[in-house]
Image (cartoon, rainbow, N blue to C red):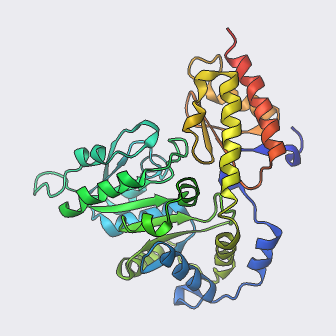
Amino acid sequence: MSSNDSVIDLRSDTVTKPSAEMRAAIASAPVGDDVYSDDPTVNSLEERVAEMFGKEAAVFTPSGSLANQLAIRMLVSPGEELICETNSHIARAELGAAAVFSGITTRTWLAERGLLNASDAMNLAKPNSGPYLVSTTAIAVENTHNFGGGTVQPISEIAALRRASQPLGLAMHLDGARIWNAHIASGTSFAEYGKHFDTISVCLSKGLGAPVGSLMISTKDRVAKARVWRKRYGAGMRQIGILAAAGHFALDNNIPALRDDHRRARVLADACAAAAKSVINPETVQTNIVSLNLSGASQSAAEFSAAAREKGLWISALGPTFVRLVTHRDIDDSQIQRGAEILQELLKRAFVA
């Protein structure tokens, strides 16, 4: 396709662009120097988001990875262990940051579609292992689970994990980059999620449509220490009210619309299953992520993605047979319908007998 205007970009919900109204909020934001804690717009955003999750404080970061890494550092000392699901973002997509920056070791448990079962985590955890073995000190849970296909973690399993882990001194971190989607899909309140975790990261620049920004949420003491590490990592920022204003706008206006993203993802999943039943079970699509399993196809994921791109549909090949599509606020129903038609055409060709 020659023009990006005709492209249907389903690579990620990170490709969203600020709306005209969000840009107006950015342009008119009161600002100050955040390194001196003088920016009123980011201060109010941090207070707002902390309150949403029932926590004392929050710190704004330029990325979700940094928010995760600051949180982990507050919970796990060098030489100690974090555990998480094998395909979680912290384990797969943060380039070993916990080890590189904080000297943290990581072990993982494998779960189908990333779905949390408290017993899986507790069977792996080895707290208080003495002077000769590595001790587990924290557990990370991703909700929704990106590489699991947008899986919503059951609040019952989160609560069960908290009950089992807390008496052993194990802390819990929530990678809530898409917690907004989990909230819409499950109806579980942000405060209910928040009460089970010691630290939380949330992202404003995915489905909510802000251009930049995440927050790490916890106690006042942990957040104060995290601010020092944010500066040490080179992420001390100045007049970031122009970014925080986008976050305020997103929280004011964009959460309910995630329901449309979820509906559109199901349309894509139904279309794909109709063309090639083995690639996906539409019943597993809970939010805005559609994961296609191309095992048995005549094309690799990379070849399938390239063929889709030739037709104006941009999708992500994330493994030899794994293709991911992500719906978002910059895609409308007509584009979803066209995308579904392209996918059906390509799947029928890839799975021809």
- Name the residue: 72% across, 84% down: 29
Q: Is residue 160 or residue 226 the one in the foreground?
A: 160
**127 lies above or below 249:** above
| Residue 21 screen position, x and y as percent | 80, 72
Left of 254 or right of it: where is 98? left
| Residue 314 screen position, x and y as percent | 74, 40
Q: Is residue 155 or residue 328 the one in the foreground?
A: 155
| Residue 140 screen position, x and y as percent | 37, 56
| Residue 62 screen position, x and y as percent | 57, 68
Left of 80 or right of it: where is 73? right
- Name the residue: 31% across, 66% down: 75
**275 lies above or below 71:** above
Residue 333 in sight: yes
The quadrant holding residue 222 is bottom left
- Name the residue: 33% across, 61% down: 172
Q: Residue furthest left?
A: 131
Residue 294 in sight: no
Which quarter of the image is occupied by the C terminus? top right
Left of 110 or right of it: where is 28? right
Which quarter of the image is occupied by the N terminus? top right
- Name the residue: 63% across, 47% down: 288
**106 lies above or below 234:** above
Q: Residue furthest front?
A: 187
